[in-house]
Amino acid sequence: MIDKNLELFDCGHRACGGCGAALAARLVTKAAGKDTIVVSATGCMEVFSTPYPETAWKVPWIHSLFENASAVASGIEASLKKQGRTEKVVIMAGDGATFDIGMICISGAFERGHDLTYICYDNEAYMNTGIQRSGATPYDASTTTSPAGKCSFGNKRPKKDMPQILAAHGAPYVATASIAYPADFMQKVEKAINTKGPCYVQVHAPCCTGWGFEGNQTVAIAKLAIETGLWVNFEMVDGKVVKAKKVVRKPVEEYLKTQKRFRHLFKPKRQDAEIAAIQAMADKNAEKYAIDIKLKKE
Amino acid sequence: MMEITEGSHAVAEAVKFCRPQVIAAYPITPQTHIVEALAEYVANCELDAEYITVENEFSALSACIGASAAGSRTYSATTSQGLALMFEVCFNVAGMRLPIVMSIANRALGAPLSIWNDQQDSISLRDSGWLQFYAEDNQEATDLHYIAYRVAEESSVLLPAFVCFDGFILSHTYEPIDMLTQDDIDRFLPKYTPSERLDAADPISFGMYATPEYYHEFRYEMDRALKESKAIIHKAGKEFGQMFGRDYSAMVEGYRLEDAETAIVALGSICGTTKDAIDEMRDEGKKVGLLKIRVFRPFPTEDVAKALLHVKRVAVLDKNISLGAKGAVTLEVKDALYNSGIPVKGYIIGLGGRDVRKKDIKEIVALVEKGQGDMFYGLRTEVL
């Protein structure tokens, strides 16, 4: 049972107002409870939550390096097993630490089958270093290393499909979630923690600073990602998609136009072909995960 | 009990007696026999440890961080490229004050690729905050593991330690070794009981980031702990000697040095060859002695100065080179003897497995007597 009143990620940390990742941390600790050891990768969350000598974490917490959170967690799990201890091991890492630099360590840890839960807070770029593209940055997003310009529409590639990659490792439970749906997210975290073996939850965590929107819009924008089909909340058990959140889909531009990172698709002139390409990605998602709710004809 | 054993197997057995609770390692020549032997111990229930077969050395030491922080005695072994891959993690382990012990079967670093011995690998990590022990033979290679855990885990130290022994020259050589027993080591090495660990019953944060207001002091405290570990090494080494007859209280060891006019300074297996060469030179009437350095970090500057102050000249053998400068040991010895007026010459020798023979040592003595040094010894000029 999740105790929604439990606060194990304390206030007073240095995150921006409206930080999706900070909300994710709070929800994860609620869902995981006190008997949890959290391993963080280097990144925004690590920096805003633990400026020495202060810490926001009321559970045992460790940070080592950018790319090794899965390996550190493997060692913790082995140590706990040896000592007969029962704490759960939860990794919290950003998309850069997950999709890119930490890929080898994650693959190793999942292949070895350690009993751990990996939460990737996905804000779709390297925010801590100043909004550079990662393997999780969406198509056409403008970042400081994939800037939109006279001959570029921003990031040239779609997101890497991490959930599929980890499912292919034999992960018993893989899920995507969104900070806009906290109850669903917490349930998924709880499920991942209570499933033996390496489990993965990727949570969409909008970044007001990096994406370019007002801090009071974080949840609304996360919701729009779901409603346009650009982000799909699903669950995979033993490699098979067993559930995906259905929506009455909105056109993708309703999501794109809310953020400065996609501004070049609308100004100085509307880029219909690019918007259509992104719409096609949402359509493909909708088909793949069967998320469309068919409205009855009036 | 005396046994004729391969160096790697002897080291593995010594590690077993230290009762590591978590081992994470990745195979690399010439370290492999150690990790294979440990895997066999675990498979046969002779060692009750979690053995994590990681995907590379970077993850090996990273997994050790987690295991050590969670409160387990932790072990790894590597060499050369593996240690280079661990570079980032090595600094992290020391900064987090985790007393991990790691065996280094010393090997050269590429390019060009070489699987053979020199000491460039561990020497290149001299600034990382790890203690560095160097073994002359396999007896010392085993014994130093017990000492390393004792010192590393001491509450005033809490720093990781390398136990270095020369790849192939020691790791793959069979020698008679007086193997201690589990009971012996249980008496010498207490159970690991860290005062701080990752524990839900008492949550703390490990590995936070430090602003310029704090970072400087973190480094100072590491340096202080490393320097103060000299006293702990002395104490542990002395106690070991009282219990088992082999005294490791000194960080440096003289051989026929008392009346020597020429001193050779070296670390590792080359000391054995040097001793034989010295015996022959002594028979010829040459007053030559050896100062063996057993602990390179912390560097025993005062001990080196004290041991060498009476000699007329010093020849330092370095199986490493700080390219563009000198060998690392030479630089330390020059520092120790600064203002003494004693000439110190360095000789880069035996890189990438080039054999070092008694006649090489004798030639170096002849060179230093002529005042020639600070050079690569034994260059094959025909291939340059």
Image (tube, grey):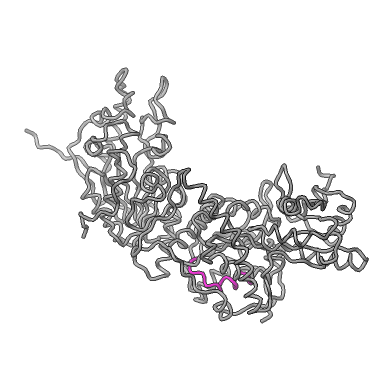
Q: Can I make out residue B60 in this image?
A: yes
Name the chief secondary structure element in magenta: helix
What residue is at 35 percent from the left and 60 percent from the top? B203
* Residue A198 appears in the rendering: no
Left/right of residue B366 with respect to residue B76 in the rendered view: right
Position of residue B189 in the picture relative to residue A11 (left or right): right
**Which quarter of the picture shows residue B293?**
bottom right
**Residue B301 to residue B276: above or below:** above
Residue sticking out furthest to the top: A268
Image coordinates of residue B105 in percent, x first then y, are 65, 61
Magenta part of the chain: B9-22
In the picture as drawn, the residue positioned furthest to the left comes out as A298
Question: How many numbered callouts?
Answer: 0
Residue A31 is situated, as x and y percent measured from the top left of the image, at 26, 55
Q: Hey, which quadrant is residue B269 in on the image?
A: bottom right
Using residue B354 as the reference point, say whether residue A121 is left or right of it. Answer: left
Q: Is B10 a magenta residue? A: yes
Position of the N terminus of chain B by quadrant: bottom right
Quadrant that contains the C terminus of chain B: top right
Q: Is residue B14 left or right of residue B370?
A: left
Please, is residue B276 above or below residue B96 in the view? below
Residue A223 is one of the magenta-drawn residues = no
Q: Position of residue A262 (x, y in %)?
A: 32, 28
User: Residue B208's x, y, as percent?
Assistant: 43, 50
Q: Which of A73 and A100 is in front in this view?
A: A73
Q: Nearer the viewer, residue A267 or B198?
A: B198
Q: Which residue lies furthest to the front in this view?
A: B339
Q: Is residue B327 above or below residue B290?
A: above
